[in-house]
Image (spheres, grey):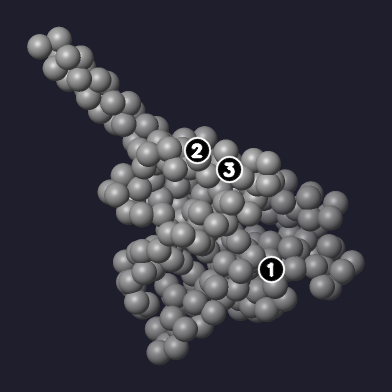
């Protein structure tokens, strides 16, 4: 884990500056070499370490690290996904769906994406939610889409900004929250708090629920979440002003 932490730290430094320089900038090579060496050492120490395998695959596939080999990166990614790493499963699913022209690529892609969903990977949940929402390759299912967006946007997972925006937008459109989600939330509170939680849930209108989602997105650094919150606040002020005017008349 210490080796993985060192490699990951070097890679994060690359990500921090890579948008401001060329992808093959020679100044990035020492950091990329450090990351590669640490991930390789971690894999040598424990060949079953899926994290090291996944991050090493990313170095070969995404970055201009000396000695990079896309075929090796692909093999490492497939191995990590088959060994159960959710990040690898999600990335492999995305790559199979976007970059492959084979007839069964969609089936193969969803196999790995659903594996990642089983482990509550936020990105995979969001992607599967959009698929259900649009009916792309599957039967359109709004309830399943909401379930995916809800689980992806939950703070204890990671609070996926895109899922929170999608969930909040659907709530504003009047889409009903499926019963499976209300039951899921009920199971997470103690018996003493259950009645109060149900009452608060019933009293909270869709706008308030949507605001909670937009706040999750805003806290994740999504400007669109802030813009939605500002829009709702302006609309609430407008309605309040009109209400006061009517009462005055």
Return the residue found at the far bottom.
103
Above or below — where is 40 with respect to 203?
Answer: below
Q: Is residue 200 above or below residue 166?
A: above
Question: Disc 2 and disc 3: Cα gap in Å?
Answer: 9 Å
Disc 2 and disc 3 in contact, CB within 8 angstroms: no
The circle drawn on residue 195 is 3
Please name whichever residue, 41 or 126, is drawn nearer the observer in this view of the structure. 126
Residue 241 horizontal/vertical position (percent): 21, 17
Which of the pair 190/118 is nearer the observer?
Answer: 190
Residue extending farthest right: 45
What's the CA distance linking mark 1 and mark 2?
37 Å
Q: Quadrant of the N terminus?
A: bottom right
Sequence order check, earlier mark of 1 and 2: 1
Q: Which residue is disc 2 drawn over?
A: 200
Residue 89 appears left or right of 135 = right
- Disc 1 is placed on an element classified as loop
- Tag 2's secondary structure? helix
The residue that disc 1 covers is 85
The residue at the far left in this view is 249
Determine crowd level at label 3: few under 14, some 14-19, many 20+ residues with C-alpha closer than 10 A.
few
Q: Which residue is drawn at 84% across and 73% down?
A: 47
Res. 25 in view:
no
The quarter in which the C terminus is drawn is top left
Q: Where is residue 147 in the image (x, y as percent from the top left)?
A: 47, 60
Where residue 44 sits, quadrant-wise, is bottom right
Instruction: Give the class, few, some or many, for how many residues have Cα within 10 Å of label 1's Cα (few <14, many ≥20).
Output: many
Q: Where is residue 59 in the image (x, y as percent from the top left)?
A: 64, 62
Left or right of 185 in this view: 107? left
Task: Tell me if 2 is positioned left or right of 111 in this view.
Answer: right
Q: Quadrant of residue 83?
A: bottom right
Of the two numbered discs 2 and 3 on the same chain, state the one appearing first in sequence. Answer: 3
């Amino acid at each position: 884990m210490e080796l993985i932490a060192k490699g990951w730290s070097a890679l994060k430094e690359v990500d921090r500056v890579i948008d401001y320089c060329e992808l093959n900038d020679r100044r990035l090579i020492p950091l990329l070499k450090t990351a590669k060496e640490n991930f390789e050492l971690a894999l040598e120490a424990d060949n079953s370490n899926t994290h090291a395998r996944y991050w090493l695959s990313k170095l070969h596939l995404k970055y201009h690290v000396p000695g990079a080999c896309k075929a090796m990166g692909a093999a490492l990614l497939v191995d990590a996904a088959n060994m159960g790493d959710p990040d690898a499963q999600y990335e492999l699913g995305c790559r199979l769906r976007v970059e492959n022209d084979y007839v069964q690529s969609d089936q193969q892609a969803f196999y790995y994406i659903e594996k990642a969903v089983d482990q509550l990977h936020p990105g995979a949940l969001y992607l599967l939610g959009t698929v259900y929402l649009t009916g792309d390759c599957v039967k359109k299912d709004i309830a399943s889409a909401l379930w995916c967006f809800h689980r992806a946007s939950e703070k204890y997972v990671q609070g996926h900004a895109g899922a929170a925006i999608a969930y909040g937008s659907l709530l504003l459109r009047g889409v009903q929250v499926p019963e499976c989600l209300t039951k899921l939330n009920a199971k997470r509170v103690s018996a003493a708090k259950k009645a109060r939680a149900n009452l608060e849930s019933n009293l909270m209108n869709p706008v308030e629920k949507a605001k909670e989602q937009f706040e999750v997105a805003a806290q994740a650094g999504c400007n669109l979440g802030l813009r939605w919150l500002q829009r709702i606040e302006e609309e609430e002020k407008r309605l309040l002003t009109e209400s006061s005017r009517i009462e005055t008349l």
